[in-house]
Image (spheres, grey):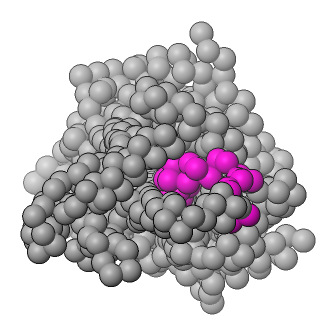
Amino acid sequence: MLEAQSLTRVFGDTRVVDDVSFTVRPGRMTGFVGANGAGKTTTMRMLMGVLGATSGEVLWDGAPATAELRRNFGYMPEERGLYPRMQVREQLVFFGRLHGMSTSQARSRADHLLAHFGLEERATSLLDDLSLGNQQRVQIAASLIHQPGALVLDEPFSGLDPLAVDSMIDLLHVEAADVPLLFSSHQLDLVERLCDDLVVLSAGRVVAAGSVEELRGHGEERYRVVLDGQDAAWLRDVRGVRVDDVDGATALLTLDGIGASELASTVVGRAPVLELARVRQPLSEIFREVTR
Amino acid sequence: MSTATTPRGLWKVVAQREITTQVRSKSFVITFALLVASIVGMIIAFTLMSGRTSTHEIAVIDQPGQTVVTTANDNAKAGDADVRFTISEFEDAEAAEKAVTDGDVDAALLPSSSGYDLVGQDDVDTSITQWVGQTATQLALERNAGESGVDLGALTSGTQVGERLLDPDAGDNGLRQVAAFVFVLLFYLMALGYGMQIAATVTQEKESRVVEILAAAVPVRAMLWGKVIGSSVLAIGQTVVLAAVGVIALLVTDNGHALSVVGPAIGWYVLFFVLGFIALATLWTVAGSLAGRQQDLNGTTAPLQMILFAPYILAVTAGAGVKTVVSMLPIVSTMMMPYRLAEGDVPMWQLGVAVGTTVLAAVLLVRLSASIYERTLLQTGRRITFKEAIASSRKTESSAA
């Protein structure tokens, strides 16, 4: 379990990261979202130890995470970087060996990861000669080469086409099945699809953190009712229900005292129904609410 | 199957990458080939120039002149000198002088009111003055002595000035100077070439941002040491190979005796090279870590280029006293000591002082460099001044204390 505890970083007079605490649990994907400049990258660099914290601590299973321990993390920095004039496979083997693997271990890992991305053919190409998308695949492979104990990925999906995103997600599900994984992203739809947990950062502070389910629970239970050709305005008179909006045969309402099945039987008993569905609050809405 | 690398051995992985990347690069192979070729070329040129007997053609216009030149030639032969004289006869002084002017002969031996004139175009070769001039004097003395009935032996007794050499090797002066010059030039080229290379690879890592991943995976000092040792192994390996090429070339060109002259200097050279190079290599990594982009490198490496260039100039121009003093200064000694050793003997204590100061400087520079390197490596995107870097490294040291 990876934990940020009151992490704070001051640059000059600016508190870029201010008393940030959250937990990244193993086996769960934790999304790290926030507007540009909210402090995500700075926080991640402090988690990795490449940037010192002004105050606060990084904990691993409750104890301060040593530099040595953190070197075992897989890291994909915001500013991508590998050796441009080095062969792809050789490069991966180099990073594997830096993480203490033997050459033969690192070779077989590199081949395995390259095969996953269908890059076996490019193993001896220079990184520079690869497309940007493929360079990004190699970058993620470099962070996974040593079967890291935790993963900190800064915008791992940016710049990838949907197929490449899927392929990378598949890989992460396999490779990081039981380690803490924190990744930042601007693509909220992606975060919504992927994440088990969420940390929302705004202006250097955590404004929301927890499982996606929990965060959604903060919003009330909303339902949409679509009647068959009948005006839905009468729903305003139903007890235990607050109608937020009516548009012809469609109404948007919030349960306020009665349960979902009671609502269903009430509506079905009074009018022909085309649709009755729970409205899941999109993450973008949660995001807008908490960062407001 | 190779064993896994322990955290302590990570510098080896870095050094290994440094070496393989370099050895594979075209510029490395080409530079190396050029250096080998120029060392072999220099030794061949030296052999051709020093081993050859030069022959001077002397214009004469009378019988006594012919006798002088013939005797001078015999004397030179008997004295084992690498010079010979041939005779070219002319009608009169005018014709002989014209031959000198036209370059047909090297000099003319013309009778004058007081004896002989050696006539040259703008100068007379010293070997001609020495052998032909002295022979003319000698013959005239003998003739005069005979005519006036003087016992020449008695007259000249006590006038003989003999020669006794305290340093007979000085006969190899040409060779020594060439060797000394090669030592200085070679270190200058190696230190500069590899130094710029080290700085450039550090800057590349900053520029390509790979440094962030490296710093997350490896202690920054392991990276520093990997780089320094990788480059040093290459530079020293190259120097040893070049030294071996030099020795083989000397043997092949039948200059084996030269080895006894420059051999010890070569040994010391390698030692000083190792020490001086390592001391400088860490500074080059700092120069690289201060630059945000390749374009900044010229600025951040300028002080180091000066450090190298100054002793190079000194070695070529300074007087003996200055050389003795500066040859004991760290880094400078790397160029100056082998230079002095090649030129002649150096007292053991001076060698000791030079090794001592260089080791001390290496230790101090490595510590300073490592702390600056750790501070500046992750500050990408801009150029940092030496002043800022030193200030920040002090600050962190005091705050850590």
**Relative vertical location of residue B305 with respect to residue A217 in this rendering, above or below:** below
Looking at the image, which residue sits at the far top?
A: B1
Can residue B363 be seen here? The reply is: no
Nearer to the camera, A213 or B241 = B241
As for residue B204 lying within the magenta part, the answer is no
Q: Which residues are magenta?
A: B158-186
Q: Quadrant of the N terminus of chain A?
A: top right
Q: Residue at x 62, y 52 (%)?
A: B170
Residue located at (35% from left, 25% from top): A114
Q: Residue furthest bottom?
A: A13
Q: Residue at point 61% right, 43% down? A: B262
Residue in view at x 18 percent, y 54 percent: B88
> Is residue B163 shown in magenta?
yes
The answer to whether residue B76 of the structure is visible from this angle is yes
B269 on left or right of B292? right
The image shows residue A143, relative to residue B99, as above or below, that is: above
Q: Position of residue B270 (x, y in %)?
A: 64, 44
Tally the numbered discs: 0
Q: Is residue B79 depicted above or below B105 in this figure?
A: above
Depth check, front residue: A168 or B399: B399
Say which of B337 and B119 sits in front.
B119
Examine the image and state in which quarter residue B263 appears: top right
Q: Position of residue A111 (x, y in %)?
A: 39, 20
Residue A178, x across and y down, in percent:
60, 29
- Horizontally, residue A121 falls left or right of residue B25, namely left
Q: Is residue B386 above or below residue A268?
A: below
| Left or right: B107, with A219 as reference point | left
The overriding secondary structure of the stretch rendered in magenta is helix
At which x and y percent is residue A179? 61, 34
